[in-house]
Image (tube, helix red, strand yellow):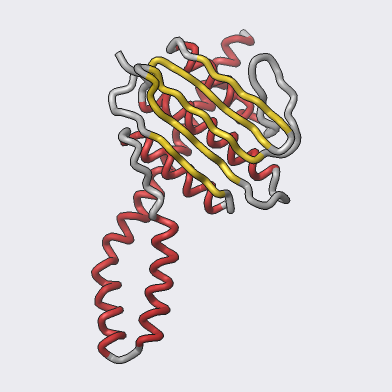
């Protein structure tokens, strides 16, 4: 009974997380489509201001557009469309929280991991990193550094992020300090990677947390 109940909780968590990640992805694409739709209007406005000799007003308008563009110009190009969308949404979320993010990623299409599995694995790890940065809110220069790439037919991922105090290790991984279903996150990551014959490692130190995995990804 307990095993069945735990499995049901995992399914509920996975469903809710997938819905949330999809919402984040849809949000960034809506914003980008909206910016593209309004672009012609913006050009007409700036042209009208310049023709009227209102240079300062036009420059201020351009400044406002530049700020908007900085918020939406986060679409990453990794080579994998599903990963592009997820990483772009998460990077946007992190930057909105004042976290500096650097990403180096190149991943092909057609991975053995499904888009849903990839979303759960990468989404959970990034959620954990963002949470770690938030716990270290008093620290300056909070950051997340991500690397993803292929090693032959294996997908390799490593991430370093700012964090609070050193976490206690429970089994082979660290549980999030958050209450409720979020604690299943790293369990789910480990389970998916092991199902595909891969492994994951986590390390917690005062002020920093690292995540790493390697998993077969191509036939």
In the depicted structure, whether residue 10 falls above or below residue 93: above
In the visual, does 211 lie left or right of 79? right
In the visual, does 207 lie left or right of 147? right
Looking at the figure, which quarter contains the N terminus? top right
Residue 61: x percent and y percent?
39, 76
Which residue is drawn at the image coordinates 65% and 25% (left, top)?
Answer: 203
Looking at the figure, which quarter contains the C terminus? top left
In the visual, does 163 lie left or right of 212? right
In the depicted structure, whether residue 41 falls above or below residue 32: below
In the depicted structure, whether residue 73 falls above or below residue 174: below
| Res 85 → quadrant | top left
Out of 182 and 69, give the one closest to the viewer. 69
Residue 29: x percent and y percent?
35, 49
Residue 104: x percent and y percent?
43, 38
Extreme residue toward the bottom, this view: 53
Out of 8 and 47, give the one closest to the viewer. 47
| Res 87 → quadrant | top left
In the depicted structure, whether residue 60 falls above or below residue 115: below
Residue 23: x percent and y percent?
43, 43
| Res 188 → quadrant | top right
- Count all numbered tags in the image, as a single digit: 0
Extreme residue toward the front, this view: 151
Which residue is drawn at the image coordinates 64% and 40% (left, top)?
Answer: 162
Which residue is drawn at the image coordinates 47% and 14% (left, top)?
Answer: 198
Which residue is drawn at the image coordinates 54% and 19% (left, top)?
Answer: 200
């Amino acid at each position: 009974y307990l095993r069945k109940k735990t499995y049901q909780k995992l399914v509920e968590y996975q469903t809710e997380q997938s819905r949330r990640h999809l919402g984040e992805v849809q949000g960034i694409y809506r914003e980008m489509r909206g910016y593209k739709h309004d672009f012609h209007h913006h050009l007409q406005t700036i042209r009208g201001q310049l023709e009227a000799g209102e240079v300062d007003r036009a420059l201020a308008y351009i400044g406002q557009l530049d700020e908007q563009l900085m918020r939406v110009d986060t679409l990453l190009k990794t080579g994998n469309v599903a990963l592009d969308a997820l990483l772009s949404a998460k990077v946007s979320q992190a930057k909105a929280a004042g976290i500096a993010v650097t990403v180096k990623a190149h991943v092909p299409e057609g991975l053995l991991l499904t888009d849903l599995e990839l979303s759960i694995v990468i989404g959970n790890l990034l959620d954990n990193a963002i949470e770690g940065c938030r716990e270290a809110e008093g620290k300056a220069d909070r950051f997340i550094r991500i690397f993803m790439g292929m090693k032959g037919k294996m997908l390799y991922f490593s991430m370093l992020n700012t964090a609070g105090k050193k976490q206690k290790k429970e089994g082979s991984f660290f549980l999030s300090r958050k209450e409720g279903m979020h604690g299943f996150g790293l369990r789910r990551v480990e389970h998916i990677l092991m199902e595909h014959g891969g492994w994951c490692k986590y390390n917690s130190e005062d002020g920093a947390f690292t995540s790493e995995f390697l998993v077969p990804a191509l036939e």
